[in-house]
Image (cartoon, coloured by chain):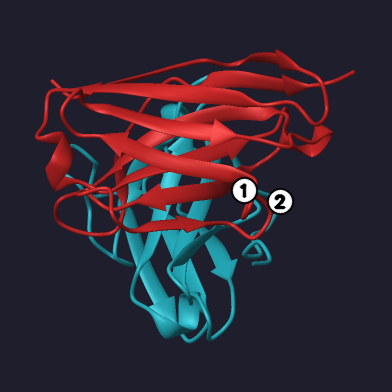
Chain colours: A red, B cyan
Amino acid sequence: EVQLVESGGGVVQPGGSLRLACAASGFTFDDYAMFWVRQAPGKGLDWVSLIGGDGRNTYYADSVKGRFNISKDNSRNFLYLQMNSLRTEDTALYYCAKRSASGTGLDFWGQGTLVTVSS
Amino acid sequence: QSALAQPRSVSGSPGQSVTISCTGTYSDVGGYNYVSWYQQHPGKAPRLMIYDVNKRPSGVPDRFSGSKSGNTASLTISGLQADDEADYYCCSYADNFSYVFGTGTTVTVL
């Protein structure tokens, strides 16, 4: 059974940093691209970043480029999101998600970890 | 990377069909056959309903179908059921290895 469990969320002041983690199990982790998607309270889904299965290729939304860094530890089956220079508009529930083997959809999602940026 | 445009809400009676549109540009929806749709119930994680415009993952009822014409993708729910009441989001691959979600649509079963 595929499981994705996020952790690392919390309250941080503007300009601060936070590192999110996503523990993956139930599938061959290094075979799949992984995503971070966020959802501000009461708002819609917002793509943040993606990383290729082998961890070499990374891509970011313009809103986080230069501030966030996605990485993948295939030996421990963990996905990470290092978030620096946080802004109040980064406040959201952050989901990790796995891309499907047979297409571009995201077929499994974690339950999310909440990041609150506030002074 | 502007969000794809979706209607804020649609509604229908049980057994009826509803269609949700998702409008983008030639840089996302129109340029690639990589549109997916997600269902999200309150307080829950999203669930993949359609991928690559019109493909259904295993376990998704065939009442859900997807299509695309030009810069607009659509999700149709036939034989509407009470449990279909949820928020629905489209998502498209876009230029420069990016993705963009839609603004979201609330489906209400009357």
Q: Which amino acid, by three-letter code, is at mark 1? A: Thr
**Residue lying furthest right:** A119
Point out residue A52 in the picture as x, y percentages from the top left corner: 28, 53
Image location (x, y in percent) of residue B97? 43, 68
Q: Chain of mark 1?
A: B
Residue depicted at x 28% and y 54%: A56
In the image, taking residue B100 as reference, residue A43 lies left or right, namely right
Identify the residue shown where x is 53% and y is 24%: A19
| Secondary structure of the residue carrying numbered label 2 | loop
Left or right of B22? Residue A13 is right
Identify residue type, mark 2.
Arg
Number of dots carrying numbers: 2
Relative image position of residue B84 (x, y in whole percent)? 45, 35
Q: Is residue B74 left or right of residue A83?
A: left
Residue marked by disc 2: B8
Q: Position of residue A59 (x, y in %)?
A: 45, 58
- The residue singled out by tag 1 in the image is B105
Callout 2: chain: B
